[in-house]
Amino acid sequence: SHKESGKLGLAVRPLTPDEQKNGNVKGGLLVERVTGPAAEAGIQPGDVVIAANGSNVTSAEQLKSAVEKSKGHIALLIQRGEARIFVPVRVG
């Protein structure tokens, strides 16, 4: 079940327990497809969204509600390989 996250342009799914273990993350959302604002911000398929505006996200619904509360700008904490990066996204 793919959930498109609002105007962010992210299709995400929760990580499986194995993926969490392998990636050494708790929770998090795997980015499967990227379009629009998220793509322009440099987010890539395979990235893991850990937090949005400082709140951990473990479901597409949580990410969506963070986007709805964000008033146009959202800072995503992304895990990409070993690195953790902040990616600011302007929400359309």
Image (cartoon, rainbow, N blue to C red):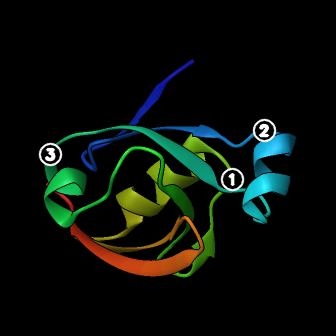
The x and y percentages for residue 2 are 50, 23
Circle 1 packing at 10 Å, graded few (<14), some (14-19), many (20+), is some
Residue 75: x and y, percent? 37, 77
Mark 2 closeness class: few <14, some 14–19, many ≥20 residues within 10 Å: few
> Residue at 13% across / 58% down in the picture?
40
- Position above or below: 33 against 26: above
Which x, y percent locates residue 9?
26, 43
Q: Which mark is residue 16?
A: 2
Q: Picture quarter containing residue 26?
A: bottom right
Label 3 is placed on what type of residue?
Gly
Whole-number angstrom distance, CA of label 3 to CA of label 2: 26 Å
Looking at the rendered structure, the kind of residue marked 2 is: Thr
Q: Quadrant of the N terminus?
A: top right
For this rendering, which residue is in front, 66 or 23? 23
Q: Which residue is mark 3?
A: 36
Q: Residue at x 53, y 78 (%)?
A: 83
Query: What's the residue type where badge 1 is placed?
Result: Thr
The reply to whether the C-beta atoms of the residues labelled 1 and 2 are less than 8 Å apart is no
Query: What x and y, as percent, mark residue 24?
Result: 78, 65
How much space separates mark 1 and mark 2, taking CA atoms? 11 Å
Circle 1 SS class = loop
For the residues labelled 3 and 1, the Cα–Cα distance comes to 22 Å
Q: Are marks 3 and 2 in contact (CB under 8 Å)?
A: no
Q: Secondary structure at mark 2?
A: loop
- Toward the top, the furthest residue is 1
User: In the picture provided, is 70 more to the left or to the right than 53?
Assistant: left
Please determine whether, in this image, residue 76 is positioned above or below residue 54. above
Q: Nearer the viewer, residue 4 or 25?
A: 25
Residue topped by disc 1 = 58
Q: Is residue 82 left or right of residue 24?
A: left
Name the quadrant containing residue 25.
bottom right
